[in-house]
Amino acid sequence: QKEVEQNSGPLSVPEGAIASLNCTYSDRGSQSFFWYRQYSGKSPELIMFIYSNGDKEDGRFTAQLNKASQYVSLLIRDSQPSDSATYLCAVNGRAGGTSYGKLTFGQGTILTVHP
Amino acid sequence: DGGITQSPKYLFRKEGQNVTLSCEQNLNHDAMYWYRQDPGQGLRLIYYSQIVNDFQKGDIAEGYSVSREKKESFPLTVTSAQKNPTAFYLCATRTGNSNQPQHFGDGTRLSIL
C-alpha cells in the first residue's frame, strides 16, 4: 500500500458542479494534511490545510478529515474552468517520528472542469 | 519583493557534468526542502534542512548533494552519479513548527543534452 494514495483520475466535471477529490494515508499518527493545486508546467500552490477531524471551509473549497478512516478529501463547489489542474494531497509525518516535518505526496489527481 | 527564488528556470546538463540549482528565500523561514517531480508523478523529497549548517537526506538523496551555510540559501547539486536527472526540481520553505505548510518556488527544469 502506498503511503499516500489519491483517487485515480482524470476527473471531469461540468462547470458549476461539485468536484470531490479523495486521499487516503497509511500512517495513523499523521497530524497535518495539505492540498496543493498545480497548473500544468507550474509549481504547486497551497489551497488548504487541516489538522482536526471534521470540515474546514475557505470560500469554494472545503477540506474534510476523518482520522479514524485515514481519509482526507477536498470539495470544490461551483467548479470553474480555472480550477482545471492537478491536485496534490500531502501528509506530514507523525510528531516525534523520523518523518515529522517531511511531507509525503500522493501522485495527484487531474481535474478538468468543462464549460 | 518577498518570496522563494529558484534559478535558473531551465538547465541543461551534459553527461558526466555536475550542475547546481539555486534556491534563495527572503522570508526568514527556517526549514528548506528540495523535491523532484517526474511527469505524471507526485513530489519526492531529495534533501531538507531545518536549521543552518544542518541537513538530512530525504527519500531519493543518491546522486545529489546540498549545503546550508546561510539561512537564505539552500543550493542543490546534481552530480554525475545521478543517472536519470531529467525532472522538474522544486524548492520549498516552511516557517514555524513542523505542522505548518510548505510553500514552493517556481522550480527548475533540468534536461540532459
Image (cartoon, coloured by chain):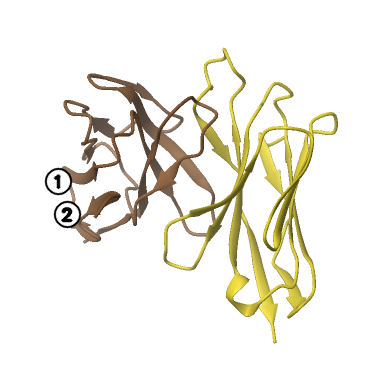
Q: Which residue is drawn at 43% across and 45% down?
A: B103
**In the structure shown, which secondary structural element does the residue marked by tag 1 occupy?**
loop
Q: Residue at x 14, y 46 (%)?
A: B17
**Residue B51: percent from the left, percent from the top?**
30, 21
The answer to whether residue B78 is visible is no
The numbered mark at residue A23 is none
Residue B3 is left or right of residue A4, and the answer is left
**Residue B63: percent from the left, percent from the top?**
29, 34
Chain letter of the residue beneath label 1 in the structure image:
B
**Residue B98: percent from the left, percent from the top?**
50, 26
Task: Name the residue type under label 1.
Answer: Gln
Task: Name the residue type under label 2.
Answer: Lys
Query: Dots 1 and 2: beta carbons under 8 Å?
Result: yes
The numbered mark at residue B17 is 1
Residue situated furthest bottom in the rendering: A115
Residue B72 is left or right of residue B35, and the answer is left
**In the structure shown, which secondary structural element does the residue marked by tag 2 occupy?**
loop
Chain letter of the residue beneath label 2 in the structure image:
B
The numbered mark at residue B14 is 2
Which one is nearer the viewer's eye here, A21 or A46? A46
The answer to whether residue A92 is visible is yes
Rounded to the nearest angstrom, the CA distance separating label 1 from label 2 is 6 Å
Colour yellow, chain: A
Residue situated furthest top in the rendering: A96
Q: For residue B96, what is the image quadrant?
A: top left
**Residue A49: percent from the left, percent from the top?**
62, 43
Q: For residue B7, what is the image quadrant?
A: bottom left
Decide: is A63 above or below A4. below
Colour brown, chain: B
Q: For residue A55, what is the image quadrant?
A: top right
Decide: is B64 above or below A49. above
